[in-house]
Amino acid sequence: MKGMRGKAVAWSTWLSAAACSCSQPAAVDAGPSVVPEPAPRVEPSEPSPPVAAVEPRPAPLPVGPVRTRQSDRAHAQGQALLLRGGESLPWLRPVPEPIAAWSSLVPLASPGTHEGEGEGEAAMPEVVAEPGPSPVAIEPAGMPGWFVPIADGEPALAHFHAALVELQQGRDPDGKVRVAMYGASGTAADLAVGYLRSYLQTRFGDGGPGFVPLVPLSRWYRHSELVVDASPGWTKEHAQIRSGRQDGHYGLLGASFTATAGKRWATVSPKGGRSSAEGIAHVELFFLRQPQGGRFRVRVDEGPYETVSTEAEAFEPGYHAIEVEPGPHTLRVETIDEAEVRVFGVVLERPDPGVVVDVLGIDGTRGANHLAWDEALWADNLARRAPDLYTLSYGTNESVDEDMSIQVYAEDLREQLRRFRRVLPGSSCVLLGPCDFPVREGDQLRPRQRLRDIIAVQREVAAEEGCGYWDGVAFMGGELSMESWVHAEPPLARGDYLHFNARGAARKGMALSDALMHAFDARSMGAEG
């Protein structure tokens, strides 16, 4: 997996060098030479134990985002992707201490181990985060949105930052730094994620659009760089669809698409005006191999068809790669017979060194649905992508699941992160906390207590499992801040008090970019200085 441990060590060494300046003391004129008296004889004794070297402690990080020429240019590109009329968003200011304190809430008591329904569960105390201070949001001057650093971000992101250094220095084994971003509808929309992709690719090189589903996930499915289209006749299945097969054969994304007749087609093509998809050279299909599996044929542009069989003795991951000359290519897949073909998605990458961001979101899903995925199949897909950083962005949908205890939620979250660690033991991990989602009662808003509980659990579990944590509620301005986002001029969020529009997503993408690169840029400037 691309020397994950080596990257982290290299980055740690580089940071230590950046944090201290070592120089030889200047020569001092000692005056005329004097012959000293001989020192008295000292009888030998047991040697003293060696003094352990003390690693220099890095200087504290700045409280606000770090601005560089590279970050300014990258933000301009991200905003051009999502905003109309040449709007330029104001820079984020550091989150005030009152917001940071109340967003953190009171630390959650340890939930313990869930013993299942009945006596074991009843024996556990109820775990509820206490209310914080006044839930009146604090607004920055001008546009809402604050800079919030990632809790434990410097150690949690060490591998990711080391990978970026190797990429810059031309030492990355395959010339790619990959990011896998899992989540629900806010992730699937590829707005804030699309901003982050543009930002990172502007700074470190464009490695291509990455993984996309082979069939649209919904009628309104979109990707920032690609157009995904398909014929009728495909059946979508994932863990959130209770009427589908709950067999876990969902692959990398957690969703599969099945056809049981010939001439069912799917296409993936570049979106007009987008540069990342215009230089594709590597195409790789992800699908399921299974007993009595059917066949499909695939081609790029108007080239010859290649026939692929999905039949195998057991259920297992299938891959089919095609190398082409760099260009704006269209992929077409078409089923051949009535035997079942079950596909997951396709990877599109450029030959150039750079960053690749896979958007892996499903509308309406929950993080616990990861536990319903066949682990061996998913793990093989994920290891093949080998992301240097993965993020999980869940919690909003779970905040309406009042029938699930917070203890069960905590244990499910722990197991989700442990699944990732089993596949990617050296990769960086960040939990992206939910944003403000108040309860609406007539014309009144009130904080959502269960969202508070979920945020407290996420903070605790992230720290336990070695992940960073980004506080979405603090970024927005605290509890009930969604009101100001919905009624901003122009608006930043929709009237459902849940989803950002493109303008609000650009603001979130800006905040995520600054948070992920905070230590990297601060230490880089220190090294250069």
Image: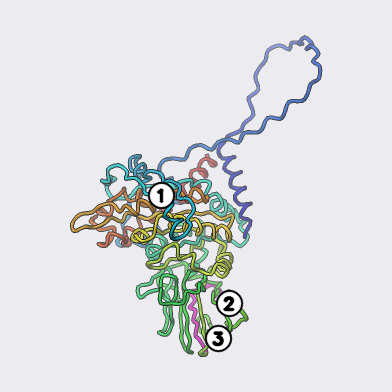
Q: Is 334 one of the magenta-colored residues?
A: yes
The kind of secondary structure element at disc 3 is strand
Residue at position x 47%, y 89% in the image: 261
Main SS category, magenta section: strand
| Cα separation between marks 2 and 3 | 15 Å
Q: Which residues are magenta?
A: 319-336
The percent position of residue 206, horizontal first and vertical second, equals 50, 62
Residue at position x 62%, y 47% in the image: 9
Residue at position x 37%, y 62% in the image: 186
Residue 316 vs residue 77: left or right? Answer: right
Residue 55 versus residue 449 in the image, above or below: above
Labelled disc at residue 125: 1
Residue 521 versus residue 174 in the image, above or below: above
Q: Residues within 10 Å of mark 1 (few under 14, many from 20)?
A: few
- Residue type for callout 2: Phe
Residue 340 vs residue 95: left or right? Answer: right
| Cα separation between marks 3 and 1 | 54 Å
Compare residues 322 and 353 and report the one nearer the observer.
Answer: 322
Compare residues 434 and 488 and report the one nearer the observer.
Answer: 434
Labelled disc at residue 330: none
The percent position of residue 462, horizontal first and vertical second, equals 48, 51
Compare residues 393 and 519 and report the one nearer the observer.
Answer: 393
Kindly identify which residue carries mark 2.
315
